[in-house]
Amino acid sequence: MKDLKFEQKSSLSRLEAADQLSALAEALRHGGNAELELGPGTMSLRVPDELRTEIEVEVGDGEIEMEIELKWPTATVRPGAAS
């Protein structure tokens, strides 16, 4: 079972989508606690210096779907700790 799951689906203009991605990029750039505006509220996430990423693109049924996934552990990993 997941500790928390948030999912939001909406239709955006290209500019609105770019603004959301820019805000996420800025939060990632600064690290620490990232404040992300999501719908009516704000979510604060601790962002470490190292992330795992996955980019997936699917083309079919007259649509292009792109998923950008960022993953990192919820616990702080100490340098030199066994993985």
Image: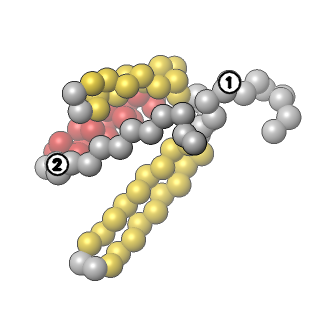
- Mark sitting on residue 60: none
Q: Residue furthest left?
A: 13
Q: Tell me the kind of residue under disc 1.
A: Thr
Which numbered disc, 2 or 1, marks the residue that appears first in the sequence? 2
Q: CA distance from mark 2 to mark 1?
A: 35 Å
Asked which secondary structure carries label 2, the reply is loop
Residue 20 location (% of width, % of height): 27, 38
- Mark sitting on residue 76: 1
At a point 34% along the width and 65% down the height, the residue shown is: 65
Residue 58 location (% of width, % of height): 39, 71
At a point 48% along the width and 58% down the height, the residue shown is: 55
Quadrant in which the C terminus appears: top right
The image shows residue 22, relative to residue 46, as above or below, that is: below
Q: Is residue 36 left or right of residue 70?
A: left
At a point 66% along the width and 27% down the height, the residue shown is: 75
Q: Is residue 74 left or right of residue 17?
A: right
Q: Residue furthest front?
A: 1
At a point 57% along the width and 42% down the height, the residue shown is: 1
What residue is shown with label 2? 12
